[in-house]
Amino acid sequence: MEICAIFSNGAIIVISTMNGDIQEYPVLFEQKILGGSWSPDLSLLIIATNEKIYSFTRDFDIENEVELYFQDRGREQLMTIGWGETQFQGSEGKQTREKLDENTEPGLISAFDDCRAIIS
């Protein structure tokens, strides 16, 4: 059996409960670690940082990483459309164009949010 300690600076230490051997793994992250959790069968480790979510094998090899904040602006990205498509829409068309999309507006943080990463 082993005990695994993951520190916010990225250092990982694994201690064997049988013989007390200590294995240290180098700092794997440039970002602060917010949380982590092992899968129920202990084959995968999920770690959340400020920018990404990582999945590691039992030997701490990166299996997958996912960006939390995408560089592509999605719906907000500018696009060019033909001149005639918007030319004669009048005041209704202007209101439609200037209307803010509520899906792209930043939301407020809930009063119940403790700003901790919880992985389950």
Image (tube, rainbow, N blue to C red):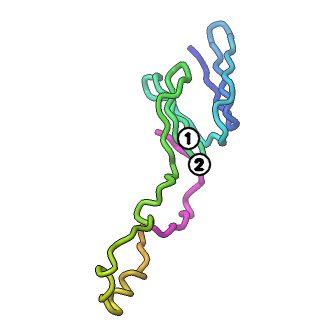
Local crowd size for mark 2, using a 10 Å CA cut-off: few (<14), some (14–19), many (≥20): few
Q: Residue at x 52, y 40 (%)?
A: 53
32 falls in the magenta region:
no
Q: Secondary structure at mark 1?
A: strand
In the rendered image, residue 44, in percent from the top left (x then y), is placed at 47, 26
Task: Determine the image quadrant of residue 85.
Answer: bottom left
Task: Determine the image quadrant of residue 59.
Answer: top right
Compared to residue 85, the image places residue 14 above or below, namely above
Compared to residue 4, the image places residue 18 above or below, namely above
105 falls in the magenta region:
yes
- In the image, the segment drawn in magenta is 104-120
Residue underneath mark 2: 116
In the rendered image, residue 28, in percent from the top left (x then y), is placed at 64, 31
User: Is 63 positioned to the left or the right of 3 in the image?
Assistant: left
**Residue in front for this viewpoint, 32 or 38:** 32
Q: Residue at x 42, y 82 (%)?
A: 98
Q: Secondary structure at mark 2?
A: loop
Residue underneath mark 1: 48
In the rendered image, residue 114, in percent from the top left (x then y), is placed at 59, 54
Q: Residue at x 52, y 36 (%)?
A: 54
In the rendered image, residue 119, in percent from the top left (x then y), is placed at 50, 40
Local crowd size for mark 1, using a 10 Å CA cut-off: few (<14), some (14–19), many (≥20): many
Distance from the alpha carbon under mark 1 to that under mark 2: 10 Å
Q: Give the quarter of the figure containing the N terminus.
A: top right
Secondary structure mostly taken by the magenta-highlighted segment of the chain:
loop
The disc labelled 2 sits on which kind of residue?
Answer: Arg
